[in-house]
Image (tube, rainbow, N blue to C red):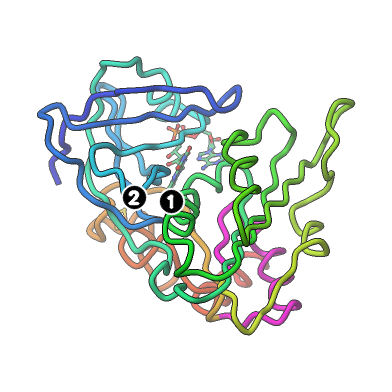
Amino acid sequence: MLPQAFQVRAAGKETPDTFTLTLAPHNGDHANSFEPGQFSMLWTFGVGELPISISGDPTKEDRLVYTVRSVGKATHALVSQQVGSSVGVRGPYGVGWPVEAARGQDLIIVAGGIGLAPLRPVIYKVLAERESYGRLVLLYGARNPRDLLYRKELVAWSRTRDTQVLVTVDYGGLSWRGHVGVVTTLFKFARIHPERSLAMICGPEIMMRFVTRELETQGLTRDRIYLSMERNMKCGVGLCGHCQYGPYFICKDGPVFTYRQMQPLLEKYEL
Ligand SMILES: Cc1cc2nc3c(=O)[nH]c(=O)nc-3n(C[C@H](O)[C@H](O)[C@H](O)COP(=O)(O)OP(=O)(O)OC[C@H]3O[C@@H](n4cnc5c(N)ncnc54)[C@H](O)[C@@H]3O)c2cc1C
Ligand code: FES
């Protein structure tokens, strides 16, 4: 439960309020290995601790990378860290995306806003082991072009074989030449084979509700649809009960769940 001291090795601006931090242990050790979709508890000295998904490449064992959107006190403190400063790290924790079960399958990744961060390690893994996976379809939506994460990588991914990258924004503005509309409007351009596909979704809950409905309409069963859930956390390891959601602790049983597990709860909270 004790945080390990990591040093900020790089800090890059993704959007006006979102930054990517690269951390490495102060003592030169390897960082703990992680599964795509897992999160760490990041502790900023004098401010507090919060859960943040690991957004980096799982094969790069000398570092942990996080993409953080500044929404309040703790996230603001994190994104304000300078290169060389210290951050406490616990974890990695939680159950990640089913990247092993997805071998040989097509993957449909649907992300909204900062939701692309926990899915980026899946994309790295699939592209690093391209022959082990089928087609990769990425549908990504943001509020406006300024809020799009990883712009250069989106272009690079779209140029790799058997990969379809579709991006949309809610409000395009005059200079935007791409799709405008919510992320579900991209499905009509996606080539999906439901019987051999797994879907992984991360974004605001309202977006995930609409995306799961669309995926069911496309023919995916609830066991083939995975969601990453967010709740306030304290301990991160299933002890305090802060993150309880129905019968589950998001920190320990998730944050990634099948839609079969989540559907009754999402319906209940919608009422
Ligand atoms: C498993 C897990 C993984 C996460 N991964 C990431 C990640 O990779 N990157 C990241 O930036 N965040 C991530 N989060 C969310 C992050 O932990 C919260 O944004 C953070 O705890 C907010 O703390 P704060 O003190 O900055 O804001 P607070 O002071 O707690 O909140 C300030 C305001 O922002 C609102 N708010 C809080 N959280 C969010 C949110 N997630 N989205 C929109 N509004 C919010 C609050 O309602 C409040 O109005 C993750 C959360 C979980 C549970
Ligand atoms: S955060 Fe304590 S039980 Fe999940």
Q: Is residue 5 left or right of residue 11?
A: left
User: Is residue 55 depicted above or below 194 in this figure?
Assistant: above
- Tag 2 and tag 1, C-beta contact below 8 Å: yes
User: Is residue 245 depicted above or below 127 in this figure?
Assistant: below
Location of mark 1 (residue): 121
Location of mark 2 (residue): 58
The x, y position of residue 239, in whole percent, is 22, 59
Crowd around label 1: few <14 · some 14–19 · many ≥20 (10 Å): many
The x, y position of residue 74, in whole percent, is 39, 29
Q: What element does badge 1 sit on?
A: helix
The x, y position of residue 54, in whole percent, is 38, 45
Residue drawn at (59%, 47%) of the image = 157
Query: In the rendered image, which quarter is residue 269 located in?
Result: bottom right
User: Is residue 256 depicted above or below 215 in this figure?
Assistant: above
Q: CA distance from mark 2 to mark 1?
A: 6 Å
Q: What element does badge 2 sit on?
A: loop
Which kind of residue does numbered mark 2 sit on?
Pro
